[in-house]
Amino acid sequence: MQTGIRVDASLGTGISPNSLQAWKTGQVLKAMVVTGTPPEAGGGRAVLRIGSNEYAVRSQTPLHAGETLQLEVKRTQPEPVLQRLAAPLPTAGSNRIAEPRTTATLEQTVKTLLTQQVSLAPSLQTLVGKLPQLSTQTAQHLDALLATLPTPQKLSQADGLRNALTTAGNHLEASLQQGRTPAAADLKLQLVQTLAGLSPADAQTTRASLEGMTARISLNQLHSTQPAAAGTHLFVELPVRTAQGFQDVRIEIESEHDGRQENPDTPPNWSVNLHLNLPGLGPLEARVASVGGSVSARFWAEQATTAQRIEGALPTLAAAWRDKGLQPGALHAFHGSAPASEHRLPDASSGLVDTRA
């Protein structure tokens, strides 16, 4: 199948007329994709590096950042058109095991083609540092995204936490499938819109971060299960704005619907695992569970002073729960790290694909 790629010299960077004039029909060129085509678009604009020059192109099929291509010059006038060549097939009898160097090259190629998921808070911090260098269009998208992120104060309020969970991006596709308009503040929606609106000048410096954050939310979605009769399991990662920068608050929510309950109106058992590392608190994990109408909580803080502050506030927490009609159970605060839970929240180093061949 022929893959047409048209070179748009008017949008290229570092292009000299001589470099285009030097191409001959039938010549084979080696290229690397600097900026891929828009995700899920089936083609579109991209940037290729051929030799020492970069060229803006329009491709009929998808191109992925980091991909290496062999291209044949099909014509040079009025605008150059390149055709992608298929990789050479192995010769007959060449069924020997790949040498270590070949295997390493294959693994690196696969890693390059796959989107690398990244933690949200560090990536946002990196993008904030790049804002002064970005185009007005891209900066406006990012400013709108940053303005909707929750603060610790908002998360401390029931409505603020509920809104943050709703707009974390985990429910975007479900909302679209059900015909509901997603919230404008939905984090995944804003990341996709920012990606779609990137100017060519910003693509190289920001695309990887935006795609990595989108992949991170998709990974959280894959680790979650949809509400069902048996219960719900949800992973959510919330990037929180603080005076010192961005921090990730990671939440795991589980509910269990016991079909054997005689009274269907009995509230289900549920548990919440909360991981955070906010300024002044240090690493902190909380596990809150409601079983049989009684709500218990355990806290683990790596800083002794934080554990002491939580211990002193437990009576206030119990009184607040009673005011809301909840029955407090066991409440404890510990200095140290929490024991491993049955479910482990995904981190940026976890992966779903083994790239070793």
Image (spheres, rainbow, N blue to C red):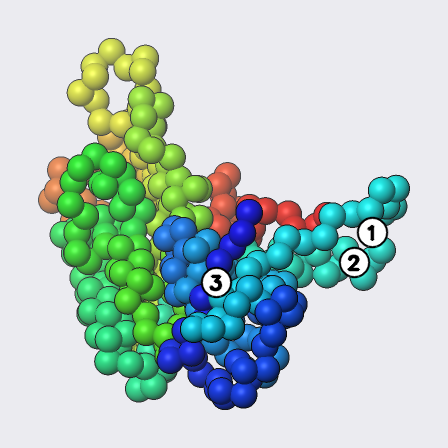
Can residue 335 be spotted in the picture? Answer: no
Which residue is painted at 12% across and 42% down in the image? 324
Tell me: residue 207, above or below residue 134. above
Question: Are circles 2 and 1 on residues that touch, CB within 8 Å?
Answer: yes
Q: Residues within 10 Å of mark 2 (few under 14, many from 20)?
A: few
Please state which amino acid type lies under the numbered disc 1.
Ala
Q: Which label sits on residue 5? A: 3
Question: Are circles 3 and 2 on residues that touch, CB within 8 Å?
Answer: no
Please state which amino acid type lies under the numbered disc 2.
Thr
Nearest to N terminus: mark 3 or mark 1: 3
Which residue in the protein does label 2 denote?
102
Instruction: Where is residue 230? Give x, y as percent.
Output: 35, 23
Which type of secondary structure does the marked residue at label 2 adopt? helix
Which residue is painted at 38% across and 35% down in the image? 225
Q: Which label sits on residue 98? A: 1
Is 54 placed left or right of 241 in the picture?
right
Please state which amino acid type lies under the numbered disc 3.
Ile
Q: Quadrant of residue 249?
A: bottom left
